């Protein structure tokens, strides 16, 4: 998870001198495009600040204690006095106020994010940030999770195989957790979403050395919806986990079989002993103990109709695995591949590079962003080099905006994965 940009004084600045570098794309620099780019840049700065606020606050189990539900649920008096507005204020009001104060008091140190202060006074910026945070929060309906077929059919009992354990964990009432973000046309840079339940919710987990490794939580369920919807015919999935994707795919009439490639023998043993016997369509399931990279090298195109990759635990460990594996699957024409949290890699790591590179070209000024890890910086630098090989021409604000859609970004990201000469 990234650090909050407004919490740390970094050497961040836009250098006000001419910036000469090889062009990334041929951009017509008329006033309409410059204005559209400025709007996108403002949205990016706002989104990145809000993303960091939400995700940094919830990573250590943020929850509301001693909640006065009578007050929370009392009649709404105005658009600013709603249930969600009250929850947002209790959970994030102080930290947003701190962020706004820091942006005004430490403008030079917090550039480019402090550019947000140019168009608004502190009160208006606070209101804008609080409204944006509130839009990123979701009160989850516990019944929708409980009615999920996996939750209805699969019941977890504690079990252990060497360092791997099967267990349950929970969310407390009004505990915030990260959810899988939906693309927002009005601001494509927003991805920090959080949900909460009004009641205690229990969910299955796999522990490795007593730390949660895999889980079936609302974000996991939502992140696989489109992949499960696309499953048909002979399906293969790389990565087993708790078998959620395999279960949901096997429930579909149009799915003939589900082959699971998993290299962890202990995970396989726990699954076979505890979870697979509860599958209504267990006869559709086949498990192969193998490394996904070794298996894909020998896999023939068309043997399977649908393929789903899910052998990383999150965005941090998954980026390199995704890029390497995606490149190996590019040769398939008949088997349709998809990749777990692919849009998250795009949102966290690649879309920010594109907006910075385009703004540098349009403004002819160098933009310095917060430092990231050396590994990530190398990937982003290679992506920037890849962008300079593109010869697309941008002649309208509409074309500029289209660059940042999920479809366009995923196309760029996949092409980069295949063509990256420094790929491990």
Image (cartoon, rainbow, N blue to C red):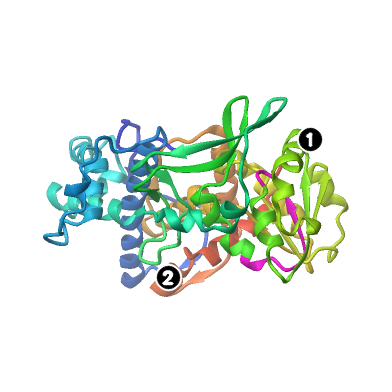
Q: Residue at x 38, y 68 (%)?
A: 29
Q: Which residues are magenta?
A: 229-242
The residue indicated by pointer 2 is 28
- Element at label 1: helix
Residue 358 to residue 86: above or below = below
Nearer the observer: mark 2 or 1; the answer is 1
Quadrant the C terminus occupies: top right
The residue indicated by pointer 1 is 265
- Residue 96 visible, this orientation: no
> Residue 158: x percent and y percent?
62, 33
> Residue 39: x percent and y percent?
31, 62
Which quadrant of the view contains residue 370?
Answer: top left
Label 2, residues with CA under 10 Å away: few <14, some 14-19, many ≥20: some
- Element at label 2: loop
- Residue 129 visible, this orientation: yes
Residue 2 to residue 221: above or below = above
Label 1, residues with CA under 10 Å away: few <14, some 14-19, many ≥20: few
Left/right of residue 334 with respect to residue 124 in the rendered view = right
Closer to us: 396 or 376: 376
Left/right of residue 192 with respect to residue 267 in the rendered view = left
> Residue 126: x percent and y percent?
19, 48
Let me know if residue 240 is in the magenta part: yes
> Residue 105: x percent and y percent?
18, 35
Which quadrant of the view contains residue 28?
Answer: bottom left
Q: Residue at x 22, y 46 (%)?
A: 69
- Cα gap from disc 2 to disc 1, whole angstroms: 56 Å
Let me know if residue 274 is in the magenta part: no
Counting labels gives: 2
Q: Which mark is residue 144?
A: none
Q: Residue at x 38, y 37 (%)?
A: 56
Mark 2 or mark 1, earlier in chain: 2
Closer to us: 212 or 326: 212
């Amino acid at each position: 998870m990234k650090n909050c940009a407004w919490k740390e004084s970094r050497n961040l600045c836009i250098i006000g001198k001419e910036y000469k570098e090889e062009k990334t794309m041929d951009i017509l620099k008329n006033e309409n495009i410059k204005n559209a780019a400025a709007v996108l840049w403002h949205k990016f700065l706002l989104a990145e600040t809000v993303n960091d606020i939400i995700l940094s606050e919830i990573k250590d189990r943020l929850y509301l204690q001693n909640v006065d539900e009578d007050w929370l649920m009392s009649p709404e008096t105005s658009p600013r006095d709603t249930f969600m507005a009250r929850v947002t204020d209790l959970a994030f009001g102080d930290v947003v106020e701190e962020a706004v104060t820091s942006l005004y008091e430490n403008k030079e140190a917090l550039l480019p994010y402090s550019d947000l202060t140019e168009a608004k006074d502190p009160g208006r910026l606070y209101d804008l940030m609080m409204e944006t945070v509130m839009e990123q929060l979701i009160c989850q309906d516990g019944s929708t999770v409980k009615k999920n077929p996996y939750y209805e059919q699969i019941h977890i009992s504690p079990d252990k195989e060497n360092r791997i354990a099967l267990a349950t964990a929970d969310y407390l009432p009004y505990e915030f957790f990260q959810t899988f973000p939906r693309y927002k046309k009005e601001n494509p840079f927003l991805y920090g979403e959080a949900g909460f339940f009004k009641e205690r919710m229990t969910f299955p987990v796999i522990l490795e050395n007593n730390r949660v490794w895999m889980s079936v939580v609302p974000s996991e369920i939502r992140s696989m919806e489109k992949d499960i919807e696309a499953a048909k015919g002979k399906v293969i999935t790389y990565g087993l986990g708790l078998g959620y994707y395999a279960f949901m795919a096997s429930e579909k009439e149009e799915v003939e079989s589900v082959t699971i490639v998993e290299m962890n023998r202990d995970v396989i043993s726990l699954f076979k002993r505890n979870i697979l016997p509860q599958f209504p369509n267990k006869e559709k399931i086949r498990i192969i103990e193998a490394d996904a990279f070794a298996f894909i090298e020998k896999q023939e195109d068309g043997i399977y109709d649908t393929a789903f990759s899910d052998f990383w635990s999150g965005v941090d460990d998954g980026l390199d695995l995704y890029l390497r594996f995606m490149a190996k699957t590019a040769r398939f024409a008949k088997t349709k591949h998809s990749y777990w949290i692919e849009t998250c890699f795009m949102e966290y790591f690649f879309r920010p590079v594109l907006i910075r590179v385009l703004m540098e070209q349009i403004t002819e000024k160098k933009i310095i962003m917060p430092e990231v890890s050396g590994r990530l910086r190398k990937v982003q630098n290679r992506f920037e080099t890849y962008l300079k090989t593109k010869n697309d021409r941008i002649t309208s604000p509409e074309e500029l905006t289209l660059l940042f859609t999920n479809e366009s970004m995923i196309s760029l990201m996949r092409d980069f994965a295949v063509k990256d000469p420094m790929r491990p």
